[in-house]
Amino acid sequence: MSSAAHWALKSALTWLAVIALLAAAFAVRYALVQGVFTSAAPVSPGACRTIAGGLQGAGDFEIDALHDAILISATDEGAKATAGQGAIYFLKLTDLTAAPAKLEGPPASFHPGGISLFRGPDGSESLTVIDHRPNGRSLIEGYSVISDGQTAKLSPQTAVQGRLLVSPHGVAAMAPDRFYVTNDHVTTGALGRFAEDYLIWPHADILLSGATGLRIAAQRLAFPGGLLARKGFLYVAAANERRIIALSIEDFTGNLTEIGALSLPARPGNISMDVAGNLIVAGQSKPGSSKVFRLRLDDKGVPVSYETLFSDDGHMLKGASAAAVWNGQLFISAAADSKMLVCTLK
């Protein structure tokens, strides 16, 4: 073999080795994100029971304690292409055995995802909803909430769309017409989606709505999902990073600055806050499992520790996506299941 041929063969083998090592590294990283090597003992805070039985795809919900209600966003993921398969439902907190009531107001073809309830200084309420249309486009719709304590009605007020709204996932309302929203992906091509999903490319973003439309408020996140805005802070669940990230919100501009983060043994989903000011985070340690964490914040608003409130391999609830604590009870929903759970906290 000539020296030139020998050099070419050696170079080719070197490149093959480098590519193999990179592929192995990305494969291990992806497996870690998906929880392939994660195991956890079951944890239940107390007795749990099913509510909202038969309600398919309850991916997100908000507790409206003022009106004794839970507002539930539900869409049958297996029937998104069929008009009328999604709705916002109303369930009374004091009558959890009742069937959730479908609220009037949204369009006939309605496929809601993340929702955020905002209460104004005058007590008026509005609900900001991500609507995933069957044609592949998404809108952020605003509804006023009119409730008498027995039921409610949604009245359409605003609708926002734009080229920056690529794959909206979670939303946090700051006012009836102002919100933050996550794009869990920002690429639309097969190569870009492969990089974001399987190479865990931190390329997604958070958008802010304003008088001039949507603009980018934060970038370089890996699958940002759930959002929560409270007291000058924004909390985002970066699912592919397995972190809850805290960002400060600048007055007037709404610009975001990361101030800290906390890693979790799960891909976090939607976020809520209990009356003590702790974050309640639903997530999945591996696909189909259900986890709920309570995160303690320090005096700067940064999450510094967590405790596991609920842990299940999918037997009780398949794939927790949202959770909230109210009046000594833990409520959990799952976009991939046909029910919700309520558990008594010890």
Image (cartoon, rainbow, N blue to C red):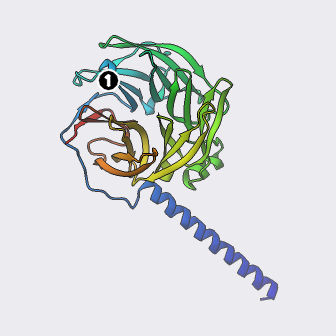
Query: Relative to 319, is 152 above or below?
Result: above
Left or right position of 270 against 314: right
Residue plotted at (53% across, 43% down): 247
Q: Position of residue 340 (x, y in %)?
A: 30, 33
Instruction: Give the position of the C terminus as an image quadrant.
Output: top left
Q: Position of residue 16 (x, y in %)?
A: 65, 72
Amino acid of disc 1: Ala
Residue plotted at (50% across, 15% down): 107
Left or right position of 343 against 153: left
Provide the residue designation for mark 1: 65
Instruction: Give the position of the N terminus as an image quadrant.
Output: bottom right
SS of the residue at dot 1? helix
Q: Position of residue 235 (x, y in %)?
A: 48, 41
Q: Position of residue 341 (x, y in %)?
A: 27, 35
Residue 288 visible in the current orientation: no
Of 66 and 105, which appears nearest the observer?
66
Local crowd size for mark 1, using a 10 Å CA cut-off: few (<14), some (14–19), many (≥20): few
Of 242 and 172, which appears nearest the observer?
172
Residue 328 visible in the current orientation: yes
Direction front: furthest residue: 299
Residue plotted at (40% across, 28% down): 74
Numbered circles on residues, count: 1
